[in-house]
Image (tube, helix red, strand yellow):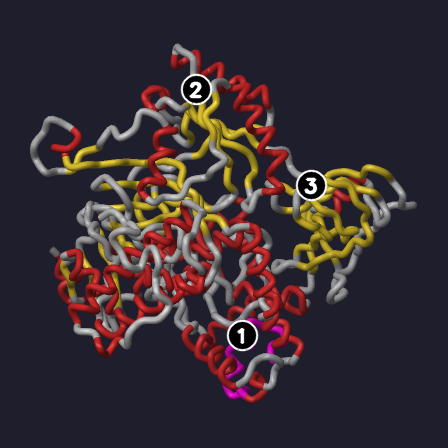
Amino acid sequence: MPAATPDENPYVEDPPTEFEPIERLSEAEADEQAELLREAIRYHDHRYYVESDPVIADRTYDALFTRLRDLEDAFDVETPDSPTRRVGGEPLDELGTVEHVAPMLSIDSSGDADDAREFARRMEREVGEHVEYVCEPKFDGLSVEVVYEDGEYVRAATRGDGHTGEDVTENVRTIGSVPHRLRGEYPDFLAVRGEVYMPEEAFREHNSERVERGEDPFANPRNAAAGSLRQLDPGVTAERPLDVFFFDVLEVRRTAGESSDESDDSLAPAREFDTHWEQHETLPEWGLKVNDRSERTDDIEDAIAYRDRLMDERADLDYEIDGVVIKVNDLDACERLGTTERAYRWAFAYKFPARAEVTTITDIVVQVGRTGRLTPVALLEPVDVGGVTVSRASLHNPEEIAEMDVNVGDEVRVERAGDVIPYVAEVVEKHAEGHYEFPDRCPVCDSPVEFDGPIAYCTGGLACDAQLRRAVEYYASDDGLDIEGLGGERVDQLIEAGLVTDSLADLYDLPGREDELADLDGWGETSAQNLLNELEASKRPRLREFLSAIGIPKVGPATAADLAREFGSVDAIRTADREQLEAVEGVGPKVAAQIAEFFDSEQNEQVIDDLLDAVGPLETPEEDETGDELAGLTFVFTGALDGYTRDEAQELVERHGGNATSSVSGNTDYLVVGEGAGQTKLDDAEEHGVETLDEKAFEALLAE
């Protein structure tokens, strides 16, 4: 349905800021007013986010939005595509995965102009004629696929491995520049690619707010966008200032009779565009925001000039870019050029050089990581590196320091690797006398330092407060057991107060010490009880989560999952020899050696024994049984099942060829309903005609 125009809707051109009392409205009047408000809000969203030309004040917009929300609450007239759903939906147990409509591939890149010219020569040679290009900024955000059916938003996924990505449907729904309903003459089915980002100014304001709340700031806008989009609670995402640019149409389908001579009503791929530039011009007509810096160029020299011009202007942009993308404009030519296994052959990323500036080292400090790794960091006289004030930069390792012969007082050139991480690239001018001496004892606990090649390690283990702090913080992180309320600052407080002294297991001795927790600065009774509830909930983790959480070197969530699948229990992994460990897919000789050494350590053995007294990981038997019996079927789970955790049920479906996603859409085949099921998913299932199963019916389907 096209969005309302000023002539058609009283809430578009000159909307009121006050309304008659809701109790005076009949249900029919409320339903009609709510629909007019939705149309008006969509119109004003388009003017604000896509056209950057708002026609009403923020206060007036807020009045419309509040009125719509009040109507929906009072009369239960909310619709799936209502703008009020931007405030967030039902929290998820974890992000599921979905298969992309079309592959989302990478782009070959280089920062050398000659490589760009060679790309152009290859294009003209293979196309056999003059080639025109479309150039656009290369955004430094998170790439997503967004899908619309019959003009309504139904799904969004991260790029992932290019073929499947994380299901972020509910999170992307909260982004203001993502329309819930398309405008104009939209197709029956549309899949588009975009880049989610956090604007620079909004990033700075959001970081300031985080610091004021005592939270750690994000390192850069890209990390902020990626972390915000992967939240399990869409309400958290809704509070983050995210935006999006759309730049590629992945697939269009129309009713066959509209795009061909066929007369049946099935959907068929439609040849909607002849060029990338037509896509760029059409996306805003459908309500999808594009970047206004995109240009058509007649040849590669113009494209190179475009890149150089954009590099000069990048400091004035309100979003991070690290280069430009040069695409063959003609879509017939793109189809003939095709792709490699990982990249589009018709596109090239001409990147900017790393940003670099010169400053002076004022000190060198050594940080202690979770595994005891010692990392030297240069403290700098603050310097602006591409619009970011840098006062610290990595020196990598002791070998790197010796090779550069860098020391306090030297003038150095600082770069941002990938436009993000600052590091010392070279010494510009020597001022220091003598060489920097790397410490032979840990700066935190005074334990001896040992070397593994160029890498230095503290041997203090969890007796080192720095390692203990980071071990606890990692144990509670998303890659660990996801214990809310245990960020870096609070972990520091627990250690300084003597509530956590020498082991991860100390966390499970906190029950009974509520008064001590509540007395910590910034806590209180509610925060203390919330942490104890989180710790209680963490006592029955999945084996793979436990293995990831305990901090085995080189073992993250993926390797932990492989180990859990292969061995099935903590004891089986602890007693495995290196040969057995190496046999696990994804575990090579070096990783196997690290795992074996971790479990051979008497100190680690004691820590694990103490943890297992409090925590009982769910043992996972070997899962060799696989098949394709559920191929083509998509399941969504809601509520608690008796026989499975949510993760186990999803894995069971996926091992037998099915898809398990986190939100109900027109593509869902079954909604499996357990105790305490979420009403939103039940309503969505009814809306889309999705069959619901209880646990017994689900098991019967599996047996069948």
Answer with mark 3 or mark 2, whichever residue precedes in sequence. Answer: 2
Mark 1 lies on a secondary structure that is helix
Which of discs 1 and 2 lies nearer the camera? The answer is 2
Can residue 233 be seen?
no
- What residue did someone put label 1 on? 505
Q: Are marks 1 and 3 in contact (CB under 8 Å)?
A: no
Q: Amino acid at mark 1?
A: Ala
Q: Position of residue 65 (x, y in %)?
A: 35, 64
Q: Is-magenta flag for residue 16?
A: no
- Residue 415's tag is 3
535 to 216, vertically: above or below: below
Name the quadrant containing residue 44. Answer: bottom left
Which of discs 3 and 2 lies nearer the camera? The answer is 2
Q: Are marks 3 and 2 in contact (CB under 8 Å)?
A: no
Answer with mark 1 or mark 3, whichever residue precedes in sequence. Answer: 3
CA distance separating discs 3 and 2:
34 Å
CA distance separating discs 1 and 2:
63 Å
Q: Is-magenta flag for residue 507?
A: yes
Q: Nearer the viewer, residue 13 or 130?
A: 13
Q: Position of residue 462 (x, y in %)?
A: 63, 67
- What residue did someone put label 2 on? 132
Q: Amino acid at mark 2?
A: Glu
Segment colored magenta: 499-514
509 to 191, vertically: above or below: below
Q: Is residue 155 left or right of residue 409?
A: left
Circle 2 residues within 10 Å: few <14, some 14–19, many ≥20: some
Can residue 206 be seen?
yes
Q: Position of residue 164 (x, y in %)?
A: 34, 44
Q: Amino acid at mark 3?
A: Glu
- Residue at the spot 54% in from the left edge and 45% down from the top edge: 319
Mark 2 lies on a secondary structure that is loop
Answer with mark 1 or mark 2, whichever residue precedes in sequence. Answer: 2
